[in-house]
Image (tube, grey):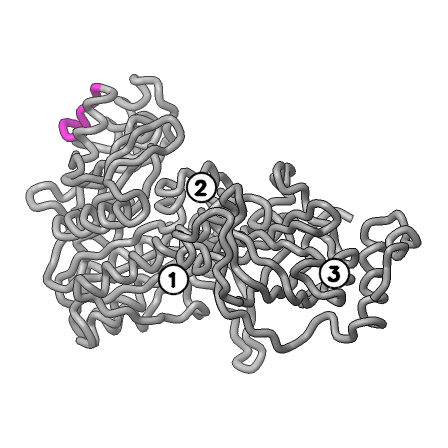
Amino acid sequence: MNDKNTTAALSSDATEVRRQKLDLLRQQVGDVYPAHFHRTITNAELAEKYENLEPDTESGDVVTVAGRVYSSRNSGMFMDLHDASGKIQIFSHKDVTGEEARALLPMIDLGDIIGVTGVVRRTKRGELTINAQQIIMLTKSLLPMPEKWHGVADVEIRYRKRHLDIMTNEESKLRFQQRSKIVSGIRRFMENDGFMEVETPMLHSVYGGATAEPFKTHHNTLKLDMYLRIAPELFLKRTLVSGLTDKVFEINRNFRNEGVSTRHNPEFTMMECYWAYADYEDIMDLVERMFAELAMKIHGSTEFTYGDKELSFKGPFRRVPMPDAVKEVTGIDFLSLKTDEEARAAATAAGFEVEKDWTWGECLAFIFEEKVEPTLIQPAHVTHFPKDISPFAKEVPGEPRLVERFETYCNTWELGNAFSELNDPEEQRARMVEQLEQAHARGEKAKQLDDEFLDAIDQGMPPAGGLGVGVDRLIMLLTNAPSIRDVILFPARRAKAD
């Protein structure tokens, strides 16, 4: 390939130039997208193996590497070649590189994927380098890369074209590598704690396990409307009934047809578990141990920074009943209020706008969300939720308006939700019927009783503690991500405008 004047004859349009180069390459070297190529070492393995190679020294070892070209200097004499593990410098010169390989250099653009075989050396300046003997085109890129040092500046393009974001943004790349470590760390923690992982359906004929608007679809063969899972709770409890295991968990994708924000995505990842013969206090201990272990895995410490806040996952976390937390912040003592009317009156007198039909518990929960949540920066378990808003939890002994439920908060966000699970089948049915009536009153006519779940509970479910952890929010905290879309590889996006 003798092409000193090749590039001069090409179009000025960047994409068209690449297509013309592709045509030339096919004419002169044949297959530009070969199926078979075997590298002998990754860039990270290379850096580790030759860590002690002295400057201005050649190892004598011949290796084969592959990756994407990120930079090119001196007409391709020096190139930075990146694989998933890191980068290596490639040196091409007539003293070390064959004529055929050197003739390929004008055809190589930033973003192309190439394979290189050559001798490992370290330059006088200390740069680990491969003296290229052979170069092969593995993938010709038809689109220009974003400018490396600035990456993809447009946030919407970053989310829509995540491949470019990761390609040019080391922070994004690291964040998704850390996400993988966190998810695998959760799985390993649960398994080491004796939990058995199962998989439950994502298509439900009756949706439930949480209060949310579902996504609807239709099964053609069964002629059945179905719903994407909003929670795996009822299937996991049926697993507990079966006696398959006393400790069950699932890392699952849930789908909720609701709003989008920096902390909400229509599909998201949860870790949900149920532990027979345990209660919500056992689950608090489990959360603290798991969070501390994950922080150590990512940061090497239970202390870490999110934005301008110094956070600590070192247990024990603060534990505070919801009525006490509200009293501390607002002065309203809900436990002294005996009726729904008294609760509404107290809330109104304190300047809160509440609905005329709200219950005591709804007033308490609303004021908590408005005034207490914004104060919860360090990790805390908020306990003793109102029974009105907690249909699957057991009552607090001596206080039937409250249940043994907690939510774990950090940085003002809810990270986890847990109960001492209700296992009285008659009370469970009564609460679900009441919940159904409320849903129908709100216009949710498709909502149904899950008779298969109720039948399983009639068979007898052991007392248990249950937990759901919002994995995406937890990853946001541990990786210092400002938006949930920064930790979901391909977040939900609006349709691209024409």
Q: What residue would you read off at disc 1?
A: 252
Identify residue for label 3. 102
Helix, strand or loop at disc 2?
A: loop
Q: Quadrant of residue 356?
A: top left
Q: Looking at the picture, how far across and down is residue 125, in whole percent?
A: 52, 41
Q: Extreme bottom residue here?
A: 221
Q: Which element type, helix, strand or loop, lies under badge 3?
A: helix
Number of numbered markers: 3
In the image, 377 versus 58, the foreground residue is 58
Closer to the chain start, of discs 2 and 3, is 3
* Distance in Å between CA atoms under marks 3 and 1: 51 Å
Q: Which residue is mark 2?
A: 263
In-front residue for pair 289/255: 289
For residue 436, side relative to residue 168 (left or right): left
- The magenta-colored residue range is 331-337
Q: Amino acid at mark 3?
A: Arg
Q: Tell me the kind of residue under disc 1.
A: Asn
Q: Residue at x 37, y 28 (%)?
A: 354
